[in-house]
Image (spheres, grey):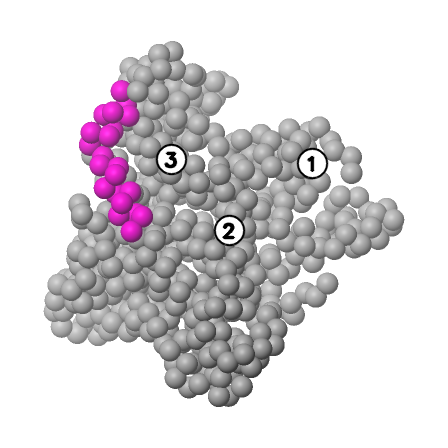
Amino acid sequence: MNKFYTKKGKLLFALPGLLLFSVFVIYPMIPQILISFQSHNGAEALGYVGWNNYTNLFQSNVFGKVHRNTYFIVGCSLLIALPVSLLLALLLERASAGVRTVFKFGALFPSVLSVTVIGKMWAGIYDADWGMLNSILRGIGMEQLTRSWLTNADTVVPCIAAAFLWQYIGLNCILFYAGIKAIPEQYYEAAIIDGAGFWRASICITIPLLQDIIKYVVIISTLGSMGMYAHILVMTAGGPGDASRSVLYQMYYKAFSMSQFGEGCAIAVIFIIECIIVSIIINKCIAKEPIQY
Amino acid sequence: MKQRLWLKILLCVIGVGFLYPMLWMILTSLKEKSEFYVNPFGLPKVWDLGNFSEALASLDILKYSFNSIIYTFFTCLITLFFGSMLAYCITRMNFRYARQVTLYMSVGLVIPIQVVMIPLYMMIMDMGLKGSRFSLVFPYSAFQMASTVLMLSAFLSTLPKELEEAAAIDGCNVYQAFFRIIFHIIKPAVLTRGMFIFISVWNEFAIAQVLGNSEKLRPIPVALQNFFLSVGVSDWGLIGAAVVMTSFPLVLIYCIGNRQIENALTAGAVLK
């Protein structure tokens, strides 16, 4: 078959894709690193400044705050959204076909909406005067809890996190459900004969067998929440003040609002390193042999 | 299996809960401006289309939809065409560097597209692509390439070797074997992937906000954000009308192709 797969053929098949990927995904990281050591206003470089951009970052309070915000959202998606969507998927498996159709239709719906629409709908929910949240609170007589959710520095980050997680919880749930469906019946038959109920069967059989898909969801939710920035831009533009900025929003803000492209690139370089470390940690923690049924 | 009533109700309520904000937007958009402030949640007393005509007057939906269509169409085309070729090369052509290329491509899964937007912005300026629609199509294609190649490779490696052997015996060269035989076999996987790319590019905001934020280039999500900035924060009827109109195409597709969209969104889970 060596004559069939010619050298020229291999090149022709591999090159266009590789080239496109290299030029627009891998290559930009090189100027990214170079600019992070320069003072740069977006149009021209104003000379090398050594590690200044980095030391500026580590000395500023904002840099710590944007990390707290970002990892708060990562924490929410791993500790709240992930267990909730797993539980919903387990319950969904027990429901009838009709209920399942209704639930699935709703759950995947936010995945086809754009972030602009999601952001604005949730801004409506949080609206101080006519929003759904405050109206409900007033309705059940808890007037003292109403507030302007998105302009209050204490509540703004959890509020954005809720909107962000709402968009992906349904998708995660359907992913888990697809995984559950792939588990062969006979595992459960054995469990039912042994008298295992819903919780026992779920914890002892379903969840261990779902490992692969749990790992996948952990990876996409962690990296997805780390890279979140559009929701913030649409809902609060980082405000009030700098209260709700994430790492990438800070990068965007430094570069495109303050014209400090050097510092923006330094943030990006640190962030890429974080992404790589986090994905190595996840792989080390949950990486096991793929499950064969 | 015994179906409990509370389970039924709980799941249906949650399912409808995901739809409720959009439903609220639809109802709001149909109310007269003054009615919203006294009756934010109920059905409109007077069904009024004024918000829609007002939104249409300042938001050129046709033009922005056209932009979005161009971006999604060309991204799908480029990614699926070159992506399936690359996947074919690394799985079936006895390619010596297959492992390294797979590892290299998986970098694209770890790095979110937004991270490189600063150098990407400068590159686009330097390459003279600024103001061209390809300034968005190329980065989109490149970023969709990673997951597309990995997913199609997983699919291609399950096909039997005999396919090409038979093709070779019948006198096909590798190009004919790929385009006439293999491509038809992987078509379902390619279409599933295409659906996924379509949804993600249609809704992409982060890069479009930076590279395509001029009157001529804006896709729908960015145009909508600009519209929101110009109408202020409390004209919910107008906001609702714009949300409903711009979401309509995808919601329609979602209602028709619900099953396909579910497949497209869950197919990515085969990547590990």
Vertical arrangement, residue B250 with respect to residue B4, above or below:
below
Q: Is residue B102 left or right of residue A8?
A: right
Label annotation for residue A96: 1
Which residue is drawn at the image coordinates 45% and 51% (left, top)? B195
Q: Residue at x 32, y 28 (%)?
A: B241
Residues in magenta, as a range: B50-70
Nearest to the observer: residue B2 or residue B153: B153
SS class, disc 3: helix
> Which circle's residue, 2 or 3, is located before the other in the chain?
3
**10 Å neighbourhood of mark 1: few (<14), some, or many (≥20)?**
some
**Mark 3 crowd level (few <14, some 14–19, many ≥20, 10 Å Cα):** few
**Residue B66 shows in this picture:** yes
- The quarter of the displayed image where residue B28 is located: top left
Can you give x and y, in whole percent of width and height, for residue B168 in the image?
Answer: 53, 80
Label 2: which secondary element: helix
Q: Which of these two is toward me, A218 or A173? A: A173
Q: Check if mark 1 and mark 2 are on a common chain.
A: no
Q: Distance between the residues labelled 3 and 1?
A: 30 Å
Q: Residue B265 carries which label?
A: 2
The image quadrant where one finds the C terminus of chain A is: bottom right
Q: Nearer the viewer, residue B96 or B112?
A: B96
